[in-house]
Amino acid sequence: MVFSLIIPVTVYKVFSKYDFKSRVGEFKKLSIISVISILLALSIFFFSSYIPTLFGFDNRNLGAIRLFYTLLIISGLIYVSVKLKLQNRTICVLFTGITFILVTTNISVKNSWIYANQFNKKLFSKLNTALQQNNIKSGNICVEYDMFNELKSNPNLTLREPLFYNDWEAPLLSEMNGIDPQKIHIYNNDKKVNCEVIFYYQKGKIIRTK
């Protein structure tokens, strides 16, 4: 919270005497560049199977869209404010307000990504312990847990951050938590049928159900 206040205050002090009117042409160019960049970034969805969504980072293209969209909001607002003949101090206050909102949002999302990473590590760490207790050293293992309910109800998750779901996520998470991905193949139970062994995970506890 302190960090999200320091940055806007700094922005206000730096730009309180900034001459926005003399740079209005630059903000207009930045707005145009941002719009073109957003359209180019979105064009990939016409030629691929990617699904555009606000949630998560299924591909790096979404990160670029968010970046240019942010630039468009800032530069566009400043350009319109100058055209409306608002005073520099008023424009600076608006700029500071946007900065506060963006910083607060980004910090919340960052904390959610950290939580999701810790959730995945804890899940695989518990799974490793369960595998050792059941003397399982190879095979296809499924993990069952209500991921969609977790994403919907967990207050620590902001924009459906990536909890373990896809098969390609398992090898690295396995290796990071002491599971040999060459011998033991981990799957989400929703993505794999006829698993040899199934473990159910809920509220930090894991039990074998098959």
Image (tube, helix red, strand yellow):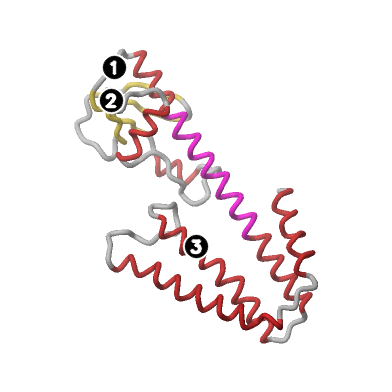
Residue nearer the viewer, 43 or 107: 43
Instruction: Kindly identify the residue that appears in the image at 37 percent across and 19 percent down.
Output: 130
Q: Residues within 10 Å of mark 3 (few under 14, many from 20)?
A: few
Is 116 magenta? The answer is yes
Helix or strand or loop: what does disc 2 sit on? strand
Residue nearer the viewer, 149 or 167: 167
Residue type of the residue flagged with mark 3: Arg
Q: Quadrant of the C terminus?
A: top left
Which mark identifies residue 66? 3
Residue type of the residue flagged with mark 2: Ile
Tell me if 29 is positioned left or right of 185 in this view: right
**Separation of marks 1 and 3 at Cα, in angstroms:** 44 Å
Q: Is residue 52 above or below residue 132?
A: below
Q: Main structural element of the magenta stretch: helix, strand or loop?
A: helix
* Quadrant of res 26: bottom right
Foreground: disc 1 or disc 3? 3
Q: Are marks 2 and 3 in contact (CB under 8 Å)?
A: no
The part of the chain drawn in magenta is: 102-123
Q: Residues within 10 Å of mark 1 (few under 14, many from 20)?
A: few
The residue to which callout 2 is attached is 184
**Separation of marks 1 and 2 at Cα, in angstroms:** 9 Å
Q: Are marks 1 and 2 in contact (CB under 8 Å)?
A: yes
Of labels 2 and 3, earlier in sequence is 3
* Quadrant of res 164: top left
Instruction: Kindly identify the residue that appears in the image at 49 percent across and 52 percent down.
Output: 159
Instruction: Kindly identify the residue that appears in the image at 55 percent across and 72 percent down.
Output: 72
Residue 103 in picture, x, y percent from top left: 64, 56
